[in-house]
Image (cartoon, grey):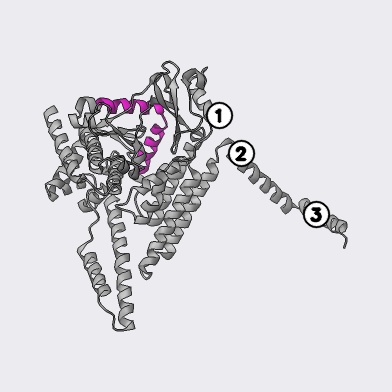
Amino acid sequence: MPFTQQAGALAGAWRRILRGRAGRISVAAATAAVAGYEYDRHCRASAVARTLRAFWTIAVISADYKLNFRSERGIEYLNSVHERAARRLLACCRDNGGLFIKFGQSIAVQSALLPPPFRRELSVLYDNAPSVPVPQIAPVIERSFPGMAIDDLFVDFSPEAVASASVAQVHTARLRSDPLQKVAVKVQKPEIQLQIGWDLFALRTCARLIELAFEIPIMWSVGEVESRLREELDFEREAHNSELARRDLADLGDSGLRRGVYIPRVFWEATGREVLTTEWVDGVSLVHPQQLARDGWSNREIMQRMVSLFAFQIFVTGNVHGDPHPGNILVRQHPDNAHAREPQLVLLDHGLYVRESRAFRRQYAEFWRSAMLNDRRAMKRIAQSWGMADAGMFSTMVSLKPPQLSSRAHRARKAAESKSAAESKSATESEGKDRGSRRSHFDRQMELKARAVAALRDSRGLPPELVFVTRNMNIVRANNQSLGIPVNRVQILGQYAALGLRRMLIDE
């Protein structure tokens, strides 16, 4: 049949399909889907697509665990399930960007409770996120300062971002009102306001799905997380947090902290809800430990200052930085010491803060002081007052100590290790050894899950501050580990807990 006749036949068949009811419905559905996709992409910053991607990722991960995480599987296979889950989460967070980067970072610091692959895979989310061109952020600056353009506020505004995070990016500039003053201009990415409602809906829904699928009570923390993330998008609030942290250091910090930590000044004339301008400070980020080593900085001195700073906030001031990851901490030579090497930490990004109630701060300090004194009765009493009967598991959750197995699981682990060390004399013995090793590995992970579930079951009494105070401690612990554990973090925390209690008693 000639080509023209074939084409005519196909066109006729297509017209007959379109004339049919099913054909018209199919075309209408396809047109609506394409239109909806384009509207979502161009008008809603792909908010719906990102939400659906998150739901799909959680569904696939849940199905993988339900189908494949079984006691008869080998250790390597069980670990591969964790690896797949972590990689899928990483891909989702990277593809979605925005607040999903923060969600992934939060998971990455839960190394005390989650398998190692989650921290290993998701820790890359602390690297710089993609930035957007200046013409796209210019409207953000202009709506923050009506009637003014970038050139009315700044000179030498850098054409490229010098840093980019999940919700904002930073440019260098000089103030128009003071051209000698170099500043860091933090500008919220233009799509964030369009995405936040959908992102928090996805967070809430995914948390509910995880709770239903795995019987892990996590919804108690979602309201606090949502509230704090919304606050983080208000840069005027961040500026106030920064100034409060500066005052706390000046008024309540000891001489070592006042000298060892610096918080950049805020320039209010160039600060709004979506734009924050602070003084520019040169330094080396903790993201680059090799550069710190080449510059001759002592990991011990760095971590001594860092752990002391955040212990001071948790137990003395009650105003706690909720995101002390390596990218938010710089190290520089102290500007007032021209004769000797002296590190000074520069603390950045004060958007995510938690205000502790006095009652929480007292109880939390008592818990840590009791831990230092090995007063298990007092630790148990405080944990139970918050609805957590398992004080040992609570200690794991707040980054005090690693999880401890029950005597039964401990015996099973020892038995499996003994079998592994013994030389097999028959195929049957070898098979039994493998089964014992698989069972003990599975049992350990199931026991850890069961204890976490039991500890969180009565979550009504858990203080809301605990969410981000625990986050702070987990990140600081991870920072200490990444630098080779140069300081005894628990001891420093215990010392500041005692100091905080002493000051509260004096105040009363």
Indicate which label's residue lies in the foreground, 2 or 1: 1
Q: Residue furthest bottom?
A: 426
Q: Using the image as rendered, state which of residue 48 and residue 267 is in the foreground.
A: 267
Local crowd size for mark 1, using a 10 Å CA cut-off: few (<14), some (14–19), many (≥20): few
Q: Which residue is mark 2?
A: 39
Residue 470 appears in the picture as rendered: yes
Residue type at mark 1: give it. Pro
Farthest residue, direction top: 177
In the picture, the quarter occupied by the C terminus is top left
Residue type pointed to by label 3: Arg
Nearest the viewer among 347 and 381 is: 347
Residue, disc 1: 135
Under tag 2, what secondary structure? Answer: helix
| Disc 3 residue crowd, few under 14, some 14–19, many 20+, Cα 10 Å | few
Q: Horizontal and vertical percent for residue 430?
A: 32, 79
Q: State which mark lies toward you, 1 or 3.
A: 1
**CA–CA distance between discs 2 and 1?**
22 Å
State the residue in front, 209 or 190. Answer: 190
Labels 1 and 3: the sequence-earlier one: 3
The percent position of residue 161, horizontal first and vertical second, equals 47, 33
Main SS of residues in magenta: helix
Residue pictured at 32% horizontal, 65% vertical: 442
Task: Please give the label number shown on residue 16.
Answer: 3
Q: Which residues are magenta?
A: 221-247
Mark 2: which amino acid? Tyr
Give residue 461's position: percent from left, percent from top: 26, 43
Res 254 visible: no
Q: Is residue 300 magenta?
A: no
- How crowded pointer 2 is (Cα within 10 Å; few <14, some 14-19, many 20+) is rated as some
Image height check: is 367 above or below 152? below
Q: Nearer the viewer, mark 2 or mark 3?
A: 2
> Of callouts 2 and 1, which one flags the residue occurring earlier in the amino acid sequence?
2
